[in-house]
Image (cartoon, rainbow, N blue to C red):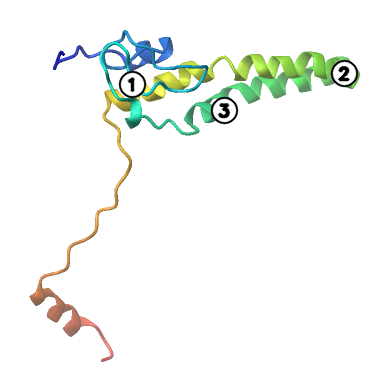
Amino acid sequence: MRTEWPSLSPMQTGIRGRCPRCGQGHLFKGFLTLNQRCEACGLDYSFADPADGPAFFVICFACVPSVALGVWLEVQFQPAWWVHLLVTIPFMFLTCIPPLRPLKGWLVASQYFYKAEEGKLVRASRPASGLEDKEAALSPGE
């Protein structure tokens, strides 16, 4: 098995749904479910945790056009409620569902490329024993 892999663009591999290491294997085994590992190079995908990131980005750029369409439709034509159901709701689905998979792939590939890990708290070390005495001497009122 190879030990060195070419540096691949997270944008290209993620949007295509390919392995971020080799660019050959599939990232997904369903619409949004990640594979456990790459079938081509064996990369374990357990490092990947895009959480709600894809949904957040889709909401940010899909809600504004959807609401704008609904408001424009209402102000311009004042249609019956069922017209909104036939026009606005399909538009919302068409702007929200298709970008989820490419965005999730891009976030997973970016996690691999930039070696992103879960944040960790770093505890401050205890002050030196001489420093404690100086702090006690400087504290007022005792």
Task: Decide which of 39, 66 is in the foreground and name it.
Answer: 39
Identify the element where label 1 is drawn: loop
Q: Residue 37's spot in the image, x, y percent?
A: 33, 21
Q: Residue at x 13, y 17 (%)?
A: 3
- Residue at 41% x, 13% y is 17
Residue 51 higher or lower than 30, as above or below = below
Residue topped by disc 3:
60
The Cα–Cα distance between marks 1 and 3, rounded to whole angstroms, is: 30 Å
Frontmost residue, 86 versus 69 = 86
Q: Which one is earlier in the sequence, the residue at label 3 or at label 2? A: 3
- The three-letter amino acid code for the residue at tag 2 is Trp
Where residue 118 sits, quadrant-wise, is: top left
Q: Are marks 3 and 2 in contact (CB under 8 Å)?
A: no
Determine which residue is flagged by label 1: 37
Residue at 15% from the left image edge and 13% from the top image edge: 2
**Residue type at tag 1:** Arg
Q: Taking 54 as reference, is 132 above or below it? A: below
CB of mark 2 within 8 Å of CB of mark 1?
no
Residue 49, given in percent of the width and then of the height, sits at 40, 32
User: Which residue type does callout 3 highlight?
Assistant: Cys
Q: How far apart are the two marked residues, 3 and 2, measured between alpha carbons?
A: 26 Å
Q: Nearer the viewer, mark 1 or mark 3?
A: 1
Q: Earlier in the sequence, mark 1 or mark 3?
A: 1
Residue for badge 2: 82
Quadrant (top left/top right/bottom left/bottom right) for the N terminus = top left
Circle 2: is it few (<14), some (14-19), or many (20+) Cα within 10 Å? Answer: few
Q: Quadrant of residue 81?
A: top right
Left/right of residue 32 with respect to residue 19 in the rendered view: right
Earlier residue among tags 2 and 1: 1
Residue 91 lies in quadrant: top right
Toward the bottom, the furthest residue is 142
Which type of secondary structure does the marked residue at label 3 adopt? helix
